[in-house]
Image (tube, helix red, strand yellow):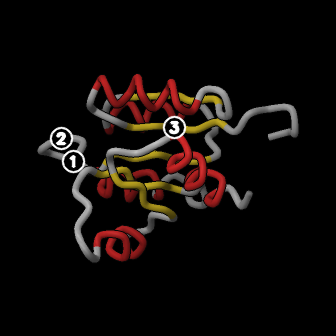
Amino acid sequence: MNAAEKPRILAVEDNSETQLLLEHLLKSSFEVVVVEGVEDALKAVDDHAFDALLLDINLSEERTGTDLLHLLRERKQMTDVPAIALTAYAMPGDREDFLEEGFDQYVSKPFTRSDLTEAIEASLGG
């Protein structure tokens, strides 16, 4: 990524309203690619390079954002890409659990533009 390019973020979110919100909140600072589920995310990372990941934890009954993170980490190009967990279920100890699972940051829903931007920038080392 050169200085003129916006960091490319892959956001994986199954809720259409939250998808639109993520795009709206992040598009001024980042190039955002929003997909709905695990298969779309795997295809996206095979087709494009990403600088960071925003993964909804509750994607479906079959697979979680944590499951997706583990699948992504199996891909050589994704081993070092920072990942941020997004979840509406903010319970004591969740942050630590997500960090232990391999996430770099944690943002609880509902979130603000600054919540997302700060987590992404911290993940990118900015």
| Structural distance between the alpha carbons of marks 2 and 1 | 5 Å
Position of 101 compared to 75: left or right?
A: left
> Label 3: few (<14), some or many (≥20) within 10 Å?
many
CB atoms of marks 2 and 1 within 8 Å: yes
Residue drawn where x is 60% and y is 32% of the image: 48
Q: Which of the numbered marks, if any, corresponds to residue 63? A: 1
* Precedes in sequence: disc 3 or disc 2: 3
Secondary structure of the residue carrying tag 3 is strand
Identity of the amino acid at label 3?
Answer: Leu
Position of 4 compared to 103: left or right?
A: right
| Structural distance between the alpha carbons of marks 3 and 2 | 18 Å
CB atoms of marks 3 and 1 within 8 Å: no
Identity of the amino acid at label 1?
Answer: Arg
* Precedes in sequence: disc 3 or disc 1: 3
Image: 124 above or below 50: below
Residue drawn where x is 80% and y is 40% of the image: 1
Residue matched to label 3: 10
Q: Which of the numbered marks, if any, corresponds to residue 60? A: 2
Residue placed most toward the observer, 41 or 8: 8
x and y percentages locating residue 13 in the rendered image: 34, 36
| Structural distance between the alpha carbons of marks 3 and 1 | 17 Å
Identity of the amino acid at label 2?
Answer: Ser
Image: 61 above or below 35: below
> Label 1: few (<14), some or many (≥20) within 10 Å?
few
Residue drawn where x is 61% and y is 59% of the image: 123
Residue placed most toward the observer, 106 or 58: 106
x and y percentages locating residue 37 in the rendered image: 31, 34
